[in-house]
Image (cartoon, grey):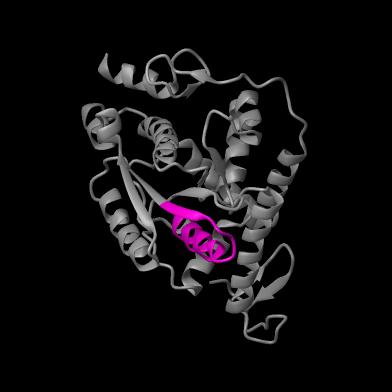
Amino acid sequence: MENTQSASCKCGREAVYFRVQEGVHYCPACLSRQTERQFEKTVSKGKMLEKNDTVAVGVSGGKDSMVLLHLMKKLSEKLPIKLVAVTIDEGIDGYRDRSMAKVNEFVKAMDIEHRIFSFENEFDVTIDNLVKNDPSIKSCTYCGVFRRTLLNKAAREVSATKLAVGHNLDDEAQSVLMNVMRGDVTRMARLAKTSEHFVRRIKPMKNIPEKEIVAYAILNNIPYFDGECPNSFNNARRDVQGMLNEMEQKYPGTKSNIISFYRKLPTIGTESVPVKCTRCGEPAAHEICKACELLEKIKT
């Protein structure tokens, strides 16, 4: 938790967290309430949910997804929505199996339906096998594309009207900066809009900093798996994450300012209308979707 130097929260209780940018100290109760208010404000302002929605919640077992499921459960006590926890098994031995154990315990305790979908069943591949067959392969690229495709399929299979993912403010800032670095205007536009061909994807935690999500998990005794994927080293996102953390340390508010700047940008160009992939029927920017392209590459 943050070094608050025995400071007090505005309510008078001992503080455990300090928001540098705002110069405000928080006690456990006030920080939790602030996080929950921010969550509900984002949902309300973005008109993310409606009564009787069925929400597929992507749950990996990490801090973000476990806090997301916890907050969605609390919200479901106020708004009549059905929750279905969805976990994607990429086939990473010693990593995904351990994180799924955390998820299984958590969903059982909260009495939430849980469905597991695997790369092996859907694509006849596992990340372990890809890396074993070609150690130089960019496994994060394959994993990201396959996960996105399978999450959308999973959401449809459980008859979800919305798909909730645990992207936080840090994730959003990283994505914006990565697309700037790549000069990818098309993907920048794609961040702002979600294709109607997909189950609508919502990000209720997109305005909550990562460290506040960690604090919320600890303060509310939310279990989570904190292991790192063995294949995640030396990838672009990790480098951008480190750079942004360093900038945030030197210049508090950097991440929020990046997001604020991005959201003020006008829509650039025209976004292509997705078509159905001629092979699998999933939404695609071209005749063949990215997942099918990568699968073909594996087989050749």
Q: Give the range drawn in magenta.
A: 65-84
Of residues 143 and 158, the one drawn nearer to the viewer in this rendering: 158
Q: In terms of secondary structure, what is the magenta stretch mainly?
A: helix
- Residue 66, image x, y percentages: 44, 59
Relative horizontal placement of residue 85, taking residue 100 as reference (left or right): right
Does residue 137 sit above or below 206 in this rendering? Answer: above
Q: In which quarter of the image is the C terminus?
A: top left
Quadrant in which residue 211 is drawn:
bottom right
Q: Residue at x 23, y 46 (%)?
A: 93
Residue 42 appears in the rendering: yes
Residue 7, relative to residue 122: is it above or below?
Answer: below
**Residue at horizontal 47%, vertical 58%?**
69
Viewer can see residue 59: no
Outermost residue to the bottom:
12
Q: Residue at x 49, y 36 (%)?
A: 236
Rendering coords of residue 279 (x, y %): 37, 16
